[in-house]
Structures are given as structure tokens and as C-alpha cells.
Amino acid sequence: MANNEITKYSPKLNTIPLKKFTATEMNLFFSIISKMRDRKDETVRFTFSKLKDLSEYKPTANKRFVNDLRKTYKKILDLKFIDQNANGLDETVFVLFSKFTIRGTADEPYVDIKIYEEALPLLNNLEEWVRYSLHEFNNINSTYAKTAFRLLKQYRTTGFAYFKKDEFRELLDIPKSYSNAEVTRTVLKTIQKNLDEFFDDLTITPIHKKGRGNPIAAYQFTFKPEERKQDDFKFVESAAKPSAKTTHQEVATDWSKKEASQLDSDNPDLNNILTQIDEVHA
């Protein structure tokens, strides 16, 4: 049975690197996220069978599943979210879940999960959001491509995404030892290969800045924008339609035009992109 689940959350969740997460752990994490949305601070119960179905988990043994759940939660505990005021003088650091109880010995094994109070805005009453098909995400094997997929979905209605080099490396958890050539060979080519089917006309361009050696300053992604009301099940039949009750305007988080324009004003490709962004937001 096709998984027609939509994962939807605040763009702030995309700013936290999922360091050392495996593909299976990412699938479990975002499957949980998909069902925690708009559940406020209630404890949400996931039966093993439901969570396996959502995450399209392949192994059948519950002992292995519990072990994967345990490892996933330990890595979730390492994710630190920061709520900071405008001047940077006040901040709160918090974790995502306040409860994660595994009951593998129950007649119907389950896991109970509750969101931490400070994390409620990440999944509730969203004014802007990232959304995508959980099925598509689950079936991307590369962790680099999985992360790039959800980052690009943040800009799905504009077709432009731009990341400073250090930010890109941090978000994708790229080893510091990788040279620019290794990033191109190991990371960018993998992303291109895995995401071509999900983003029409996907182009990845390293942006260079002036200086000795023409160093890379950022990575630019362009693709054909999706319509604001287009569903996310491009390759899944019988997709659930967006709710007619949705009243919030869909907002694609803007990427830093100001930072991009400071890199190299003589770059014709970049200038063309910036012009198109002006047209999209006009």
C-alpha cells in the first residue's frame, strides 16, 4: 500500500544538522514528525506496525526495530534547538521530545512520544512550513540526498536555494576533511543523481568569489518551481488532496539574496538568478 503521508513542519527544523543519522534513522524521525503535527502537547502513540508502515521499515524482527528506535532517540536527544530573540541576548536551548517510551513487550508493541513544550511552535499552528511526500523521502537512500531533498523542498515554490559553503557542509554533515573536489564528487553528484526525478531541471552550481584561487563561497540550486497548490505526490498514485480548510498562505522561506549578491556581482549566471528572484517575489 502506498504511503500517502505528508510531512510538514516549521522551516526552523531544517536548520538543525542531523549529524550521524543513518537513512533508516532519518526515515523513523520524519515519520514521527509527520504524525506529531498539530497534536500540541498530547502523548502520541505509535504502534510498531504503524511506525514501520510510515517509515517503510524493511526488517521484520521487533528486537532490531527497538534497537533502531533506541539509536534514533539517542541522536534526537543530541539535537539542540535554540529560540533566540532579535538582539541575541536572550535564548532558550531545548530538545524536541520530552517523552519517548518504548513498550516492546506489550501485546501490541508501541512507542509513546510527547513533544517538549518549548518545541510546540515547530509542529503546531504553522504560519510557514516545509512540506513533502514522506514516501519520496523514505525511498532516497543517500543521507546527503535525503537532507538536500528536504532543504530544497523548503524553496519548492520559488525554485531557488542558496547556501554558504560552511553552512552547506554543516547542514549535510560533510566531513571537514573533504576537499572541494571531494564534495563535488561524493556529495553534489550523489544529490544530482538521486534528486533529478523529484526536481525538474535541477542544476547545482558552485559559486566562486574573487580572490586567490577563485575559492568556492556557496552552492546554488535551481529547479522548476512547483505550483503553490501542487500536491507532493508526483510519483504516487491516489494521493491525498490538500485540505480545503487550509487558510494559511503557503510561504517558501526566502534565501539570502543579499549574501548572494555580495559574492560576485560580475557573475552573469548569478545576476540572472537574482533577477528571476525579484520577478518571483514581485
Image (cartoon, helix red, strand yellow):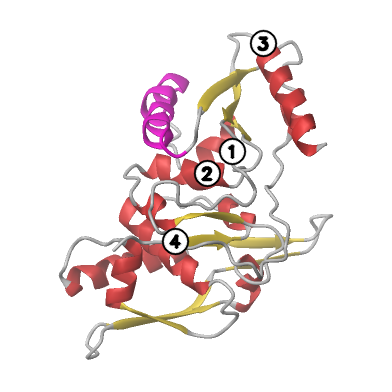
* Residues shaded magenta: 178-198
Residue 30's tag is: 4
Task: State if disc 1 and disc 2 touch (CB < 8 Å).
Answer: yes
Residue 167's tag is: 1
Local secondary structure at mark 2 = helix
Image coords of residue 196 (percent x, y): 42, 32
Tell me the distance, in whole angstroms, between the alpha carbons under discs 3 and 2.
25 Å
Give the residue pinned by disc 2: 171
- Could you classify mark 3 by the number of other residues whose Cα lies within 10 Å: few (under 14), some (14-19), or many (20 or more)? few
Give the residue pinned by disc 3: 211
Q: Identify the residue at the far left of this view.
A: 61
Q: Is residue 53 left or right of residue 274?
A: left
Tell me the distance, in whole angstroms, between the alpha carbons under discs 3 and 4.
41 Å
Q: Amino acid at mark 3?
A: Gly
Q: Quadrant of residue 166?
A: top right
Which of the marked residues, 2 or 4, is nearer the chain's N terminus? 4
Image coords of residue 178 (percent x, y): 42, 28
Q: Tell me the quarter of the image containing the C terminus.
A: top right
Label 1 vs label 4, nearer the camera: 4
Q: Nearer the viewer, residue 76 or 10?
A: 10
Tell me the distance, in whole angstroms, between the alpha carbons under discs 2 and 1.
6 Å
Q: Amino acid at mark 2?
A: Leu
Asked if the stretch drawn in magenta spans residue 189, the answer is yes
Tell me the distance, in whole angstroms, between the alpha carbons under discs 1 and 4.
22 Å
Which of the marked residues, 3 or 4, is nearer the chain's N terminus? 4
Image coords of residue 121 (percent x, y): 66, 69
Q: Is residue 67 left or right of residue 97?
A: left
| Residue at 40% from the left image edge and 59% from the top image edge | 238
Local secondary structure at mark 4 = helix
Q: Tell me the quarter of the image containing the N terminus.
A: bottom left
Tell me the distance, in whole angstroms, between the alpha carbons under discs 1 and 3.
20 Å
Q: Amino acid at mark 1?
A: Glu
